[in-house]
Image (cartoon, helix red, strand yellow):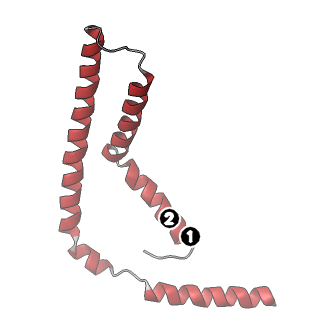
Amino acid sequence: MLSYLASETSEAYLKKMKKMYAIDVNQLGALEWVLVIAGTFATIVSTIALVYWLYKIILFLWQVKLAKANLNDSIFWKRMGIALVIIMLFVTSGMFAILEGIFNVLGKMGWTM
């Protein structure tokens, strides 16, 4: 009996929350130009970051050739590896896939988008 009341109360609560926090899709459609500008900006920044990353790798290899740096510099390779992972997450839209997964979990918990 108590579990029935708890589930009934939580259902009523979820319905109330869905009404209060509902997103109007028509308003989001009007903001499409913001998404286009943000996407363009993200593409430009990601491209610049990737070119800079390649420049740093080539510069490091040039310094190795001139014997000014050691090829076994683990700190450099770790830093460049982490930077490449972050850049690739943005370039391949991996960040959006992660956010989509979060929103799917929230949707299963009762939140509507």
> Within the image, what quadrant is residue 54 found in?
top left
Looking at numbered disc 2 in the image, what kind of residue is underneath it?
Asn
Indicate left or right for 54 with 113 as reference. left
Which residue is at a point 22% across and 59% down the rendered structure image? 38
Which residue is at a point 26% across and 27% down the rendered structure image? 56
Question: Which disc number belongs to residue 104?
Answer: 2
Closer-to-camera residue (65/10) = 65
Determine the residue located farthest toward the front in the rendered image. 68
In which quadrant will I find the C terminus?
bottom left
Label 2, label 1: how many angstroms apart (C-alpha)?
Answer: 6 Å
Which residue carries the number 1 mark?
A: 108
Please say if the residues under marks 2 and 1 sit with CB atoms less than 8 Å apart. Answer: yes
**What secondary structure is marked by label 2?**
helix
Is 45 drawn above or below residue 12 in the view shown?
above
Looking at numbered disc 1 in the image, what kind of residue is underneath it?
Lys
In which quadrant will I find the N terminus?
bottom right
Determine the residue located farthest toward the right in the rendered image. 1
> Within the image, what quadrant is residue 26 found in?
bottom left
Indicate left or right for 113 with 5 as reference. left
Is 7 drawn above or below residue 32 in the view shown?
below
- Residue 89 coordinates in the image, percent (x, y): 37, 44
**What secondary structure is marked by label 1?**
helix
